[in-house]
């Protein structure tokens, strides 16, 4: 599982001209899922993400986590995080999770995050989405379950 976490001042996701998810201060999280991932992996990734201390305290040090700053989450599925570009110029996506498995785990992640964070918005699995954000910093962290 891969999470690309961007600290944002605001972010939104639109499908067919309709905004379906929108947050202010918090994290925009792009989520890639492979077939080997399960709920145990998801729980570990969620715990790590929510605990990241990447918001500034009064001294300007990145010392505060998402809950402490009352931050929000915008969760967007993105199978392209598993792109394999080793051969040629056209990426292969065979390492991305099968849609049924990936969608079920994505929905699990959304529900698990809602138990921890007050405002959780999300994209639409498999849809052509337009994502807008104002990255704060910029500050971007990549979490890969293979490295945890």
Image: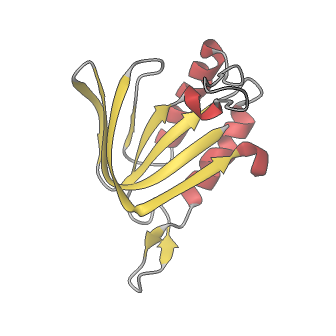
In this view, which residue lies farthest toward the bottom? 59
The image quadrant of residue 19 is: top left
The image quadrant of residue 90 is: top right
Q: Is residue 59 above or below residue 20?
A: below
**Residue 97: where, in percent of width, then height?**
67, 21
Q: In the image, 19: left or right of 90?
A: left
- For image coordinates 67% across by 42% down, the residue present is 43
The image quadrant of residue 98 is: top right
Q: In the image, 16: left or right of 73?
A: left
**Residue 64: where, in percent of width, then height?**
48, 70
Q: In the image, 90: left or right of 70?
A: right
In this view, which residue lies farthest toward the left? 17
Number of marks drawn: 0
In this view, which residue lies farthest toward the front? 88
**Residue 122: where, in percent of width, then height?**
40, 33
Q: Nearer the viewer, residue 84 or 108?
A: 84
Q: Is residue 92 above or below residue 111?
A: above
- For image coordinates 73% across by 23% down, the residue present is 35
Q: Is residue 6 above or below residue 3?
A: below
In this view, which residue lies farthest toward the top? 100
**Residue 82: where, in percent of width, then height?**
65, 31
- For image coordinates 56% across by 56% down, the residue present is 141
- For image coordinates 57% across by 29% down, the residue present is 80
Q: Nearer the viewer, residue 25 or 113?
A: 25
């Amino acid at each position: 599982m891969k999470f690309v976490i961007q600290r944002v001042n605001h972010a939104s996701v639109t499908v067919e001209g309709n905004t379906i998810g929108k947050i202010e201060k918090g994290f925009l999280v792009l989520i890639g899922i492979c077939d080997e991932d399960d709920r145990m992996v998801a729980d570990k990734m969620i715990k790590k993400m929510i605990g990241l201390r990447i918001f500034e305290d009064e001294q300007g040090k990145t010392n505060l986590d998402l809950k402490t700053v009352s931050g929000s989450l915008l969760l967007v599925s993105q199978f392209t995080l598993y792109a394999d570009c080793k051969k040629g110029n056209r990426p292969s996506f065979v390492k991305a999770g099968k849609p049924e498995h990936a969608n079920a785990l994505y929905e699990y992640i959304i529900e698990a995050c809602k138990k921890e964070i007050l405002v959780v918005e999300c994209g639409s699995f498999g849809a052509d989405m337009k994502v807008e954000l104002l990255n704060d910093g910029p500050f971007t962290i990549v979490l890969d379950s293979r490295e945890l």
